[in-house]
Image (tube, rainbow, N blue to C red):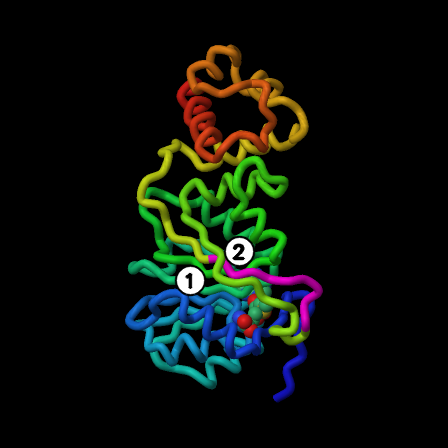
Amino acid sequence: MKIIAKKSLGQNFLFDKNIIKIITDCTKIENKNILEIGPGTGNLTKEIIRKKPKKILLIEKDTKLLDLLKKKYTENITFINKDVLKINENFLSKEKLVVFGNLPYNISTEILIKWILNLGSKVWFEKLILMFQKEVADRIISKFNTSTYGRLSIMCNWRLNIKKIIDIKPNSFKPKPKVDSSLLIFTPKEKFFNLDSPKTIEKITRIFFNQKRKKIKKSFNLLFNNADLVAEKLQINLNLRPQNLDYEDYYLIAKEFENLRN
Ligand code: SAM
């Protein structure tokens, strides 16, 4: 059956066998509980199944494609015909999941941020292996004092260790996307700044990076009644700009903001 890729669902199918091998070799699959989001025509799924996972959950929005996969595979697979953005990930499995996702670019970022904001003390996944537009992946892994550093890297690095696996050229996909892609692997951090709410980091970084070129004194004044005292306590120089503060500085600021508000 001829499959016509739906642009609206960001369907760029990965057919490069070498890349599929790199993706499925970057973590142990045997006997693991796997979640694949956006399996599409099943190119990755096939290789995942070959590696003998304990069970697989597949979440795919496109009913037709999921029906085709249902006909092909049966054993130990749960098919979920839903929009991944509308699913409560905490109820997917009792056991921790290894997640693979070659999703449309905009959804990869949205789902990652949603998952980070919803993280409780117990993390529901063991690893996330996700595809991004290369430019976005570079922002996620960027370090302070670089031009790509910003909210995305600060939010993602709060609870997750992040590593780039590989950059992928458009000709590994059909149809070809217009941009390069990168595969990132995320593992939960054992030690991280405990905050009452992840939304605090979202709020703090929004205030700082809305005024990206201004000195951070301005943002401090918006957040704290006595900005100079707080800056002194946290040993942060108010003449710096948002890109000069390391991740940890932002987590410290978020913690102090929560302490003073409570
Ligand atoms: N994983 C396949 C591969 O590598 O060839 C397909 C990748 S394609 C870039 C993205 C897949 O995600 C498509 O199959 C698409 O239908 C599915 N998808 C798009 N939006 C989705 C959503 N919100 N929830 C679940 N699946 C979605």
Cβ of disc 2 within 8 Å of ligand 1?
yes
- Residue at image position (49%, 65%) is 37
In the rendered structure, which segment of residues is drawn in magenta? 176-184
Report the front residue among 112 and 190: 190
Q: Secondary structure at mark 2?
A: helix
Q: Secondary structure at mark 1?
A: strand
Instruction: Residue type at mark 2: give it.
Output: Leu
The image quarter containing residue 50 is: bottom left
Q: CA distance from mark 2 to mark 1?
A: 15 Å
Report the front residue among 87 and 151: 151
Relative to 141, does residue 58 appear above or below in the rendering?
below
Report the front residue among 178 and 225: 178
Relative to 14, does residue 142 appear above or below in the rendering?
above
Callout 2: few (<14), some (14-19), or many (20+) C-alpha neighbours within 10 Å?
A: some
Q: Quadrant of the N terminus?
A: bottom right
In the rendered image, is residue 186 in sight?
Answer: yes
The image quarter containing residue 133 is: bottom right
Q: Quadrant of the C terminus?
A: top left
Q: Which residue is tagged 2?
A: 85
Q: Quadrant of ligand 1?
A: bottom right
Callout 1: few (<14), some (14-19), or many (20+) C-alpha neighbours within 10 Å?
A: many
Image disc number at residue 99: 1
